[in-house]
Each structure stands twice: as C-alpha cells, then as structure tokens.
Image: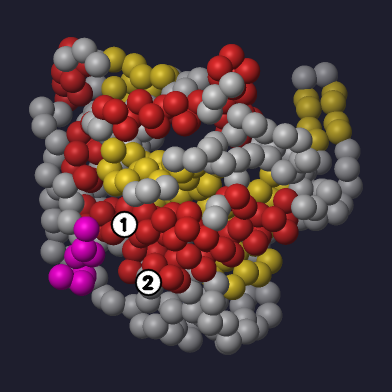
C-alpha cells in the first residue's frame, strides 16, 4: 500500500459487500494509547436472584429456567419474529410489503452470572460453539427457515441490559440484506476464479501480516482492510467452510481458543468488559448449494478511546457513508501488542 495512504484521506473497498469506507488518518498522528479511567468495576455474583437468565429463576413470560449446567437455549420471550401467521405480499403503487416469519432464541453461554466469554474456560466456550452448531442445524433444517443469524450484543452500550453471558439467534424465512450482499460478492468471485474470496483475502493478509491480531492452526483474527468500527475484527477459518456445522472437533477447540484470546485482548484494551456486537455470517439454509460461502465471525465494538468514549455513527456516516480516523493497521498493531492474560487475572 502506498505510503501516502498512511497520511492522506482515502477510501477503502469492502470486498464482501461492495461498499466503500472513508479513512482519514491525518486526523490522528499516531494510535491512541488509551486512557485508563479508574472506575471501579464491581465483580458480579455467580448467581443473581433478579436475573431472568440465571438457572432456576422465573422469566418475564412466567416460565422458569431449569437448573441448567451447560449452555441453555430457550425461545425469546420478546421475539421480534413469530412462526406461522399470515403469508401475504402487498403492493399498492410505490408501497410494498411482505409477511416475515421466524423464530428468536436466547442462548445462555453459562449458568454462571459473573462470567463472559473471555473469562470462561476454553472447554466451556467449546460447549457454546457446539450449542450454536446444534441450533444452526435444528433451525436450518426447518422448511420455514432459510437463514439463521447467530449473534451477541454485549454491554449496556450495545443495548444489552442483562449482564448474564448470553447471545441470540434470529432465524427467518427470508435471507437478510447483509447476507444477500455477501453472497453476491462471494459468488461473483467464485464464478470467475473457482476459489473462495475470503480464502484468497486471508492468504494475502497472512503474507502482509499488517492487520493480523492472532492466529492459530485453524483460525485467524484480523482487522479487515475495510473495517468501519475503530477496533473491528473478523475471525476467519483457514479452511473454507460454508457454515459452523462443518467444524471438526479440533477446529471447534481452535475456534474457542481464538474467540477467548480475542475477547481477552478486547477487555485488556481499556481494562473493561469490552462491549461489542458479534455475529456469525454463514450460508443461508434454503437447501441450495453455496460453494462460494466462507463463514466468518465479525466483531463491531463501539469504543474509541476509553471505556466511556465511543465512536458515534452520525452526520456524514448516516447520510453519506462510514468514516474512520485510526487506520485498520494501527488498530491491529494496538490489539496485537496487548497482553494475552486477562487484566483481572494478573
Ligand atoms: Zn444471571
């Protein structure tokens, strides 16, 4: 990459979505070292009688959670999508609508209220991955489900009011727009080259080593060249797999390890339980073949400079397109150099 790009405004192309992002590196002379605010963070108890997700507690719906000891899934009491219902398409002049059906589930990662992925044991993170696999297979096999979105919103800042370690799954009839974009761009590349777009991208990144954060035998975590969020990352499997159902036992372990290591680095960045939204993008489940798909997990964290200063998506970004100041290379370097041990366990 030209040296000019390190000091001058430029735009970068997202190969997966076909969108551009504006980068303004001249606004930051060097990567921000992070301001550590001495705000005491209370350690949460392992069990909270008022938590809807703790084992044995009553939920908003009136149902009671079992005394679960491993990752536990239940139907979201406030589901955004509902199964069944009328199926209709509406069109009147320029007004257009379609019915949407689906299911929303909650996955409790652990019975222990005090934990998060970075501080869970690797073997317990493996169980979360196995639960995701099980849900992807179960929901994906349904006739009325053509896409399964597995994600986690972590922290108040991401609108997650309950600190109990958990994620969500929204499964639905139609394929959501982000996944449609990614399918289209991977497919175009596959048809031209008979190779995985993300696989070739990963190969180039591994040669350059500028944006790699962590790697192991089966997975790589990097800051994508086109990252929007200050410390956005992506976990990509080295082997092309369309979905998590294809993970071998050895790959599950490697995935759990990199997931834990990456989130430890995140927590260490501003010495806080780092907020983010993460999601696993994989092939739709509508019985078609998707030889072009290469599953990956993206992390979109909002924090910019400290545990309280976040990046706002406002003004230009809302009306024109995303913009960032620190470059993907600077963010990767900062994350790479952080300790591998969790700051609370020092
Ligand atoms: Zn809880």
State whether residue 284 is above or below residue 110. Answer: above
The residue indicated by pointer 2 is: 121
For residue 118, which numbered disc appears in the image?
Answer: none
Residue 135 vertical position relative to residue 225 in the rendered view, above or below: below
Asked whether 275 falls inside the magenta stretch, the response is: no
Image position of 148 (left or right of 236): right
Span shown in magenta: 340-346
Q: Position of residue 168 (x, y in %)?
A: 57, 58
Q: Residues within 10 Å of mark 2 (few under 14, many from 20)?
A: some
Q: Residue at x 66, y 70 (%)?
A: 74
Q: Give the answer, above or below, for where 299 lies relative to 116.
A: above
Occupied quadrant, residue 340: bottom left
Image spot of residue 295 (x, y percent): 54, 41
Identified at 85% across, 23% down, the residue is 92
Tag 1 near tag 2, CB within 8 Å: no
Residues packed near mark 1 inside 10 Å, few (<14), some (14 to 19) or many (20 plus): many
- Which residue is painted at 47% across and 58% down in the image? 250
Image location of residue 212, percent across then percent down: 28, 38
- Determine which residue is flagged by label 1: 261
Most foreground residue, 242 or 224: 242
Q: Residue at x 48, y 74 (%)?
A: 110
| Secondary element type, mark 2 | loop
**Which quarter of the figure is the C terminus placed in?**
bottom left
Q: Is residue 342 magenta?
A: yes
Res. 155 visible in picture: no
In this picture, residue 212 sits left or right of residue 16: left
The correct choice, above or below, for 319 with respect to 216 in the image is above
Residue nearest the observer in this picture, 188 or 143: 188
- Quarter of the image where the N terminus is located: top left
First of labels 1, 2 by sequence position: 2
């Amino acid at each position: 990459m030209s040296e000019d790009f390190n000091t001058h405004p430029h735009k970068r192309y997202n190969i997966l979505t076909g969108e551009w992002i504006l980068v303004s590196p001249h606004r930051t002379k060097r990567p921000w070292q992070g301001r550590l605010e001495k705000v005491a963070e209370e350690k949460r108890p392992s069990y909270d009688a008022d938590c809807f997700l703790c084992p044995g507690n009553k939920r908003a719906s009136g149902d009671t959670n079992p005394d679960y000891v491993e990752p536990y899934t239940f139907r979201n009491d406030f589901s955004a999508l509902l199964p069944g219902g009328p199926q209709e398409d509406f069109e009147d002049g320029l007004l257009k609508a379609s019915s949407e059906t689906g299911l929303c589930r909650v996955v409790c990662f652990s019975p222990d209220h005090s934990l998060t992925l970075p501080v869970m044991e690797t073997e317990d993170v493996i169980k979360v991955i196995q639960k995701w696999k099980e849900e992807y297979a179960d929901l994906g096999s349904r006739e009325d489900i053509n896409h399964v979105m597995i994600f986690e919103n972590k922290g108040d800042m991401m609108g997650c009011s309950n600190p109990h370690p958990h994620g969500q799954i929204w499964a639905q009839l139609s394929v959501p727009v982000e996944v449609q974009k990614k399918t289209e761009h991977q497919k175009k590349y596959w048809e031209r080259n008979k190779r995985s777009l993300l696989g070739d991208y990963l190969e180039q990144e591994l040669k350059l080593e500028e944006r790699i954060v962590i790697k192991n035998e089966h997975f790589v975590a990097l800051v994508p060249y086109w990252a929007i969020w200050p410390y956005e990352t992506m976990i990509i499997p080295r082997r092309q797999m369309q979905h998590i159902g294809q993970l071998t036992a050895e790959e599950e372990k490697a995935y759990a390890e990199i997931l834990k290591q990456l989130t430890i680095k995140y927590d260490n960045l501003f010495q806080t339980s780092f907020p983010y939204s993460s999601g696993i993008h994989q092939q739709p489940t509508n019985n078609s073949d998707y030889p072009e798909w290469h599953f990956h997990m993206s992390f979109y964290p909002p924090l910019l400079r400290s545990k309280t200063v976040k990046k706002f998506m406002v003004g230009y970004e809302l009306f024109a397109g995303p913009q960032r100041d620190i470059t993907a290379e600077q963010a990767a370097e900062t994350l790479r150099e952080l300790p591998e041990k969790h700051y609370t366990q020092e």
